[in-house]
Image (cartoon, grey):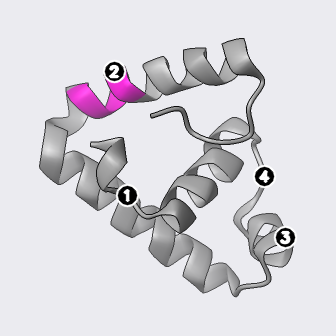
Amino acid sequence: MIKELTERQKTVLNLVYFEEMRQQDVADYLGIKQQSVNDLLNRALKTMKKKGGKRRILKNFKKIELDHCKTGSERFVI
């Protein structure tokens, strides 16, 4: 499910959900508009929901968060 996201979508998800950055801060950091960040998030979540359903999304988010904490990485672990 995560493998099907673009690198940009993974980056935005990581920054918003794990680094706890606001959408405007992510936009400034990446040099894009805030609306683009919002669109990337929406498309990523829609893709994840379509491929795995709500429960699977939450399960994958928990796994990613655990992997993220273990590695200290700033990127999604696939």
Q: Amino acid at mark 3?
A: Tyr
Q: Which residues are magenta?
A: 56-60
Residue 49 position, x and y percent, is 22, 48
In the displayed structure, 40 sits above or below 78; it is below
Residue 72 coordinates in the image, percent (x, y): 78, 23
Q: Is residue 3 left or right of residue 16?
A: left
Query: How far apart are the alpha carbons under marks 2 and 1?
Result: 17 Å
Residue bearing the label numbered 1: 5
Give me the C-alpha separation between circle 3 and circle 1: 20 Å
- Tag 2: amino acid: Lys
Mark 4 or mark 3: which is in front?
3
User: How far, Cα to Cα, is label 4 from label 1?
Assistant: 20 Å
Give the residue drawn at x 71%, y 19%: 71
Expressed as whole percent of the image width and height from the top left, the position of residue 21 reads 78, 52
User: Which secondary structure, mark 4?
Assistant: loop
Q: Which residue is mark 3?
A: 29
Q: Earlier in the sequence, mark 2 or mark 4?
A: 4
The mark that comes first in sequence, 4 or 3, is 4
Q: Earlier in the sequence, mark 3 or mark 1?
A: 1
C-alpha span from label 2 to label 4: 22 Å
Q: Residue 59: which disc? A: 2
Q: Give the residue at mark 4.
A: 21
Work out how far the residue at label 2 is from the one at label 3, CA to CA, in angstroms. 28 Å
Q: Give the number of the mark in front: 2 or 1.
A: 1
| Callout 2–callout 4 Cβ contact below 8 Å | no
Secondary structure beneath disc 2?
helix
Assess whether mark 3 and mark 4 are in contact (beta carbons under 8 angstroms).
Answer: yes
Mark 4 neighbour class, 10 Å CA radius: few under 14, some 14 to 19, many 20 or more: some
Q: Amino acid at mark 4?
A: Met
Of marks 4 and 1, which one's residue comes earlier in the chain?
1
Which secondary structure lies at badge 3? helix
